[in-house]
Amino acid sequence: MRITALNITPGRLTAEVVTEPDQRTTPELIARVLQDFPQLPQHSCVNAHGPVFASVMEDTPLPHLLEHLVIDLQVAQQPEASTATFTGFTKWTDAKAGRASVTVNFRDDACALAAVRYACAYLNDVLEELSHGEEDR
């Protein structure tokens, strides 16, 4: 996954991302991510299967996972924002080309920018780690 553009407007950050077309999360990927982000399943999430991210997290587009990681990182980095509500949404801009737009709100633009960059690098590292594990089998 790579970030191709960032757009910051008052209170919102939108990351344009590119991933492999149809790249989705897997139970193995989520199990690995939950080692570092155990609270992800409890995130509120509007989806067709339930009220929380756990309802879809093992089979959702990779940019959707990025959205939840960015939100989680913002909460972790801003303890004073514990009463704040962080929201986001992800939409495909060109699903066949693997292009998506991930938008999140923020209280601190520098924190949001750091969160989106870290989350993208983190996901790439975990995907690389998992692909090496498969090669060893």
Image (tube, rainbow, N blue to C red):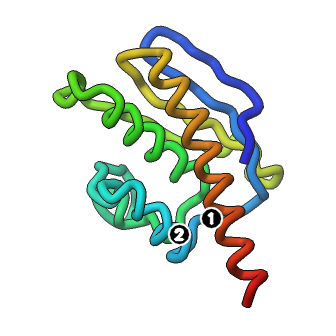
Label 1: few (<14), some (14–19) or many (≥20) C-alpha neighbours in 10 Å: some
> Would residue 104 appear left or right of 134 to someone viewing this image?
left
The residue located at (70%, 39%) in the rendering is: 17
Find numbered disc 2 in the image and state the secondary structure of the residue it sits on.
loop
Front residue of this view, candidates 30 and 54: 30
The residue at which mark 1 appears reads as: 24
Q: Position of residue 16 (x, y in %)?
A: 69, 33
Q: Position of residue 117 (x, y in %)?
A: 60, 33
40 versus 118 height, above or below? below
In the rendered image, the residue lying farthest to the bottom is 137
Please report whichever mark, 1 or 2, sits nearer to the chain's N-terminal start.
1
Contact? badges 1 and 2 (CB < 8 Å)? yes
**Which mark is drawn over residue 59?**
2
For mark 2, does the 10 Å Cα neighbourhood hold few (<14), some (14 to 19), or many (20 or more) residues? some
Please give the count of numbered marks on the rendered protein.
Answer: 2
Type of the residue with mark 1:
Arg
| Residue ID at (41%, 38%) | 73
**Disc 1 versus disc 2: distance between alpha carbons?**
6 Å
**What is the quadrant of the C terminus in the image?**
bottom right
Q: Which residue is situated farthest in the front direction here?
A: 136
Relative to 37, 92 lies left or right: right
Examine the rendered structure and indicate whether residue 6 appears above or below residue 20.
Answer: above
The image quarter containing residue 56 is: bottom left
Q: Which residue is painted at 60% across and 56% down in the image?
A: 62
Q: Nearer the viewer, residue 22 or 132?
A: 132
Instruction: Identify which amino acid the numbered label 2 is placed on.
Output: Asp
Residue 70 rendering spot, x and y as whole percentages: 47, 38
Residue 13: give x, y in percent of width and height: 53, 22
Image check: 60 left or right of 45? right
Q: Is residue 96 above or below residue 28?
A: above
